[in-house]
Image (tube, rainbow, N blue to C red):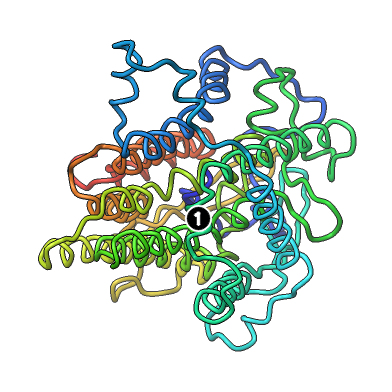
Amino acid sequence: MAAHREKKSEERNHKSAQNGAQAPQAQWGRACSVLDYREVDWFSLASILFLLAFAPLIVYYFIMSCDQYQCSLTDPLINLLMGNKHLSDIWNKTPSLTYTAAGIYAAWVAFQVILYVFVPDFCHKFLPGYVGGVQEGAVTPAGVVNKYEINGLQAWIITHVLWFANAYYFHYFSPTIIFDNWIPLLWCANILGYVVSTFAMIKGYFFPTNAKDCKFTGNFFYDYMMGIEFNPRIGKWFDFKLFFNGRPGIVAWTLINLSYAAKQQELYGHVTNSMILVNVLQGIYVLDYFWNEAWYLKTIDICHDHFGWYLGWGDCVWLPYLYTLQGLYLVYHPVQLCTANAIGILALGLVGYYIFRMTNHQKDLFRRTNGNCKIWGKKPDYIECSYMSVDGTKYYSKLLTSGFWGWARHFNYTGDLMGSLAYCLTCGFEHILPYFYIVYMTILLTHRCIRDEHRCYSKYGKDWKRYTAAVPYRLIPGLF
């Protein structure tokens, strides 16, 4: 869900064919109009109803399997089918919501809100190359340009400095606090996810931030799932989409893994190299996200998706609970990798990250310089495309076909998948549970490839066909 971040599959350096004015945002994805009611097809509605009904159960099933069945995904089903257990038996053994967990979670979210809203970024003042502070987002379909306080890296640093200070000096709470309250915290996360999603829907109906950037389909479930408001806000700076996509879930990601490592130390007297690899590789991804938070303002999550249950609940529950399954698994099944395997997995993860980062860097460089740059030592090739805006004005874009973008149209996703596989390989092959992540990411990113390209074809038409002829593969050169 939200958690993995992507660049749009197109480059924008728009020039008006009529008067040279700056181009407005293209109609990227759902049309946005307070009066624009559109019928939702049955397949989309069925998919949404399935996710609303079963996504929370999937999360619960995975976490319960670790808590009660040593991370076996099949044993609970076998016990139920054989009549050895009843659903009530499993539910009764599940830890319930506690005041301790509620207090921890409330303090956590409040602290992240304070860091997000009330502590202006200072990291950009002394970190070379880091873009922070007040930044502008993309133009919305209604023509609004929102401003954002980019301070996620600062929030991550402050949070982790305090975490380590407590672990080594103050000892106010145990570093295992997250693992020890993991299931009670799950209920807290669900409560917040549903509350914020419901509030966002009510807000979209009765007091939207910008009514022209709202979308009503007339279908309650679709609007609740996918959202009504494009960029719901409270006050000047609290942006729901940016906050919940990055905080509290992604800031917590590395803390959750650290808590898993602390629990492993407590239980077994040492931390395995596999747990260290998970912390390092996923920590690199988290830091990359916050270092490039300003870049994230140009991704589909911000530029296309409305804020509903998909992002609200997904970032509160799905991301922190299912993206950290490898570390959770290693608490129950510690794996000490041989040196060769550890080095191989580390290399796979680092190469995947390099591809992911350099692919996006090439596109950013090409966009910033309008193609007046060098990629792999030579002037880049590209496809010149044109499209018509809603007011009938013609604009031009350039689609990069050099560097990694000449290998595949979404090669950044390929690097992402390599890193995802590395996370899973740290856990060995005893259980399938930790491999959920690579399966999920493969489905998600493949679907995004198809979704993005459908929009690009609708926008560019014949020019998009020229582009796909020049770069025929989506993810894996020579295969797909």
Q: Which residue is drawn at 56% across and 22% down?
A: 48
Q: Is residue 271 above or below residue 84?
A: below
Q: Which residue is drawn at 58% across and 66% down?
A: 173
Labels in figure, total: 1
Q: Identify the residue position indicated by label 1 in the image.
A: 11
Q: Helix, strand, or loop for circle 1?
A: loop
Task: Mark yes or no: residue 406 visible.
Answer: no
Q: How crowded is mark 1: few (under 14 residues within 10 Å), some or many (20 or more)?
A: some
Q: In this view, does 357 lie above or below 227?
A: below
Left or right relative to 479: residue 266: right
Q: Hey, which residue is sitting farthest bottom in the picture?
A: 126
Q: Quadrant of residue 52?
A: top right
Left or right relative to 409: residue 166: right
Name the image quarter holding the C terminus: top left
Q: Which residue is drawn at 22% across and 60% down?
A: 348
Q: Nearer the viewer, residue 25 or 466?
A: 25
Q: In which quarter of the image is residue 71?
A: top left
Task: Mark yes or no: residue 9 visible.
Answer: yes
- Counting from the top left corner in percent of width and height, residue 386 is at 53, 46
- Counting from the top left corner in percent of width and height, residue 262 is at 41, 64
Q: Which of 317 and 442 is in front in this view?
A: 317
Q: Is residue 461 above or below residue 366?
A: above
Q: Is residue 300 above or below residue 457?
A: below
Q: Hey, which residue is sitting farthest right in the picture?
A: 207
- Counting from the top left corner in percent of width and height, residue 24 is at 70, 51
- Counting from the top left corner in percent of width and height, residue 197 is at 71, 36
Amino acid type shown at disc 1: Glu
